[in-house]
Amino acid sequence: MIRRVHASGQLRRRHTVVSPGYSHAHSRRTAVFARVAVLVVLLSTPAFANPSASLRGSLASVARMYRVARAQGLRFYSTSSAVRSAVSAGRLVPLTSNDYVEIDTDVGYPYARPETRRFVNRFGAQYHAACGERLVITSAVRPSSRQPVNSSRRSVHPTGMAVDLRKPDGRCLTWLRSALLGYEDRGVIEATEEHEPAHFHVAVFAGPR
């Protein structure tokens, strides 16, 4: 209801009718705006964001890598022939040395998933720019039948999503720890600093953003 003052000074009332169609359309637009707001929040949150990023190894870290591998439907290759078949099918791709990355000669299976190779090459360029030396890969995909005796049964190396990095010294070690924590915090990787032997284990969930 709207009140109006007439020229005569008398107060007159006029009823305004809101059509059912307008009310329905307004409610529908409100619902759409609410869904869009929720979608914006979801898209701005990394799928595997890790607010408790740490390089310390733990059962929780191993479980997290294994859980993501299963959620992404990755295959766990059990034999050398299975790895070769995956390479032929393009599910695993070769890791090669370049200006920024060195593949150690002891790597028995220099292959990884495509997104892992992309991460290695981009991260290697960042490492080289910061340290002036190449990032060294000491292990990549390993079939389950060729895993070390002390490896976890939930290791993701058989999927090709993980690589091991040689542990550097001095300022390069400081940079590497900081950079890996940054990527882990964003949900791109899960990284662990191992001590026997000394290296960094890095499982790649997604390419660098």
Image (tube, helix red, strand yellow):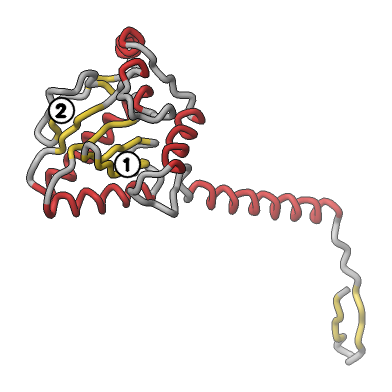
From the image, tell me which residue sits under label 2.
103
Residue, x 48% and y 42% (percent of image)? 47
Residue, x 32% and y 13% (percent of image)? 83
Q: Residue furthest front?
A: 149
User: Which amino acid, by three-letter code, is at mark 1?
Assistant: Pro
Residue 198 drawn at (x, y percent): 21, 40
Residue 91 drawn at (x, y percent): 35, 18
Q: Nearer the viewer, residue 208 or 81?
A: 81
Sequence-first tag of 1 and 2 = 2
Which quadrant holds residue 113?
Answer: top left
Q: Nearer the viewer, residue 60 or 118?
A: 60
Q: Is residue 121 above or below residue 195?
A: above
* Residue 116: image tag: none
Q: Secondary structure at mark 2?
A: strand
Do the numbered discs 1 and 2 sit on residues whose CB atoms are within 8 Å? no
- In the rendered image, the quadrant that contains the N terminus is bottom right
Q: CA distance from mark 1 to mark 2?
A: 20 Å
Residue, x 39% and y 51% (percent of image)? 53
In this rendering, position of residue 208 left or right of residue 13: left
- In the rendered image, the quadrant that contains the C terminus is top left
Dot 1 surroundings within 10 Å: few (below 14), some, or many (20 or more)? Answer: some
Which quadrant holds residue 112?
Answer: top left
Which quadrant holds residue 204?
Answer: top left
In this rendering, position of residue 82 left or right of residue 178: right
Q: Residue furthest left?
A: 132
Residue 30 drawn at (x, y percent): 70, 55
From the image, tell me which residue sits under label 1.
208
Residue, x 47% and y 50% (percent of image)? 44
Dot 2 surroundings within 10 Å: few (below 14), some, or many (20 or more)? Answer: some
In this rendering, position of residue 72 left or right of residue 14: left
User: Which amino acid, by three-letter code, is at mark 2?
Assistant: Ile
Q: Secondary structure at mark 1?
A: loop
